[in-house]
Image (cartoon, rainbow, N blue to C red):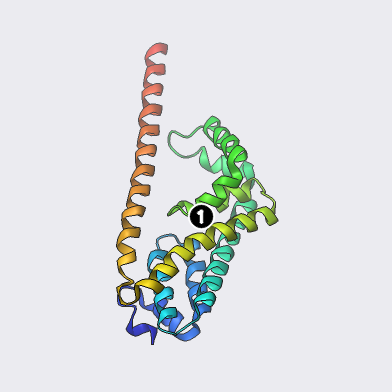
Amino acid sequence: MIESIGNTAPGWITSLMDTLGAPGAGVAIAAENLFPPLPSEVILPLAGFAAARGSMHLASALAWTTLGSVIGALALYGVGASLGRERTVAIATRLPLVRVADIERTERWFRRHETKAVFFGRMIPLFRSFISIPAGIERMPIPVFLALTTLGSLIWNAVFVLAGFLLGEKWEEVTGYAEVYSKVVLAAAALAVAVFAVARVSRRGAGMRRRG
């Protein structure tokens, strides 16, 4: 029974895997893509450990979790495509310190690096979900989006599933390393936002002084 081994996993995740096996892991990962606070760093190694225990096949764990990643990414791509550029700009410009020029600069960056952004974004916590939205806004070709998402998600998922499979009873050690990685990424993102905000406020203050 998976419930007996998933001590740190939320109950609904262990119940899904216990009831559905590998497809349950896929459902959990699809949900994680839509709601990033859900712990993929727990779901994936737990699926690997379940495979080591014989509760599911390793290949099935990898296939279903990757399929779940792709389905979740497609849903967010649809959100971006539905919003479209004009609506996104209207929403973004209501945010403090954000200007149309910032959005246009981001658009240009994404167009230059869209394939790398989607592929490598699948291996960065938080961004691995949200990168699908600008891909949808920019209407990245679906076949390209699917190929990059599948490959990037397979690599990310395989690292954690295989770690759980190989570590066996110590599978929970993976989550500790993953948490450190996530905290570093989130700290870097927070620092970037803080630098942007300080620079924007400073420029605005300098402009007001010149006009005064």
Q: Amino acid at mark 1?
A: Arg
Looking at the picture, how far across and down is residue 132, in whole percent? 56, 53
Looking at the picture, how far across and down is residue 96, in whole percent? 43, 36
Looking at the picture, how far across and down is residue 71, in whole percent? 58, 65
The residue located at (49%, 39%) in the rendering is 94
Label 1: which residue? Answer: 122
Determine if residue 212 is in view.
no
The secondary structure type at the circle numbered 1 is loop
Looking at the picture, how far across and down is residue 133, in whole percent? 57, 51
The vertical placement of 173 against 109, above or below, is below
The residue located at (53%, 78%) in the rendering is 23
Image quadrant where residue 42 sits: bottom left
In the foreground, 130 or 95: 130
Mark 1 crowd level (few <14, some 14–19, many ≥20, 10 Å Cα): many
Q: How many marks do you count on the picture? A: 1
Q: Is residue 34 left or right of residue 110?
A: left
- Quadrant of the drawing holding the N terminus: bottom left
> Hey, which residue is sitting farthest front in the picture?
166
